Image (spheres, rainbow, N blue to C red):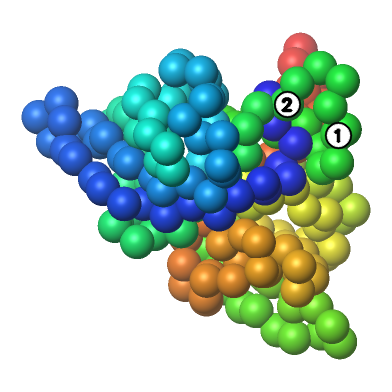
Amino acid sequence: MFTGIVTGLGTVRAITQSGSGRDMRLEIASPWPETARIPLGASIACSGCCLTAIELGPDWFAVNASDETLSKTTLGAWRVGSRVNLERPLKVGDELGGHIVAGHVDGVGEVLSADPVNGSVRWTFRVPDPLARFIAPKGSVAIDGVSLTVNEVRGPEFSVNIIPHTAAVTSFGFLKPGDPVNIEIDTVARYVARLSEYK
């Protein structure tokens, strides 16, 4: 489990195709000074996608992404140089600064616009229609692994505000309209919806 509070901005440094070209091995340069001490097999949220560390170096780690992961997230479009939001898993007793994030991407959304509003930027996204019902004003959503509060919802479109600090320490500083983003809906919304529809 994660909180959606990004603690590092990594960079894809190498990509190797595997599994007859349907799977991918990614090496990600990490800003964490303790990267080499991360336990082998540990989970790391990579732009919202929970992946397993299979190899570690002093300033990098490697993960595998299956064909299923590549087809359901933005990872299939990553290239060498792509920026990656990083978060280590939540420990019992840690401060829960964002909201509970599983690292299980529900779908890929699209950036529609980024409009300056006073000292922040209002970002508007479109999500696939099946996810729209899970997004509510003042609710939580994870975008590329970043825990955010929803400001406004209009059908499959919703907006959030990004302050300068968030833009500086996450991939929001590199996003632009038309870019795809990983979307994870709020866990509570998922179960409320399931309870309401079950008969």
Q: Residue at x 49, y 52 (%)?
A: 10
Which residue has dot 2 on it?
90
Relative to 179, residue 38 above or below: above
What residue is shown at x 36% (from left), y 51% (from top)? 12
The Cα atoms of the two marked residues, 1 and 2, are separated by: 8 Å
Count of marks, rendered view: 2
Give how far across and how far down residue 182 sits, in percent: 53, 49
Residue type, numbered disc 1: Leu
In the rendered structure, the answer to whether residue 182 lies left or right of residue 57 reads right
Q: Is residue 88 above or below residue 42?
A: below
Residue 137: which quarter of the image? Answer: bottom right
Answer above or below: position of 171 versus 164.
Answer: above
Can residue 159 be spotted in the picture?
Answer: no
- Name the image quarter holding the N terminus: top right
Q: Which comes sooner in the sequence, label 1 or label 2?
A: 2
Give the label on residue 96, or none.
1
| Disc 1 residue crowd, few under 14, some 14–19, many 20+, Cα 10 Å | some
Q: Position of residue 167 (x, y in %)?
A: 67, 69
Amino acid bearing label 2: Leu
Residue nearer the viewer, 113 or 193: 113
Q: Secondary structure at mark 2?
A: loop
Q: Residue 66 at x, y = what percent?
A: 31, 28
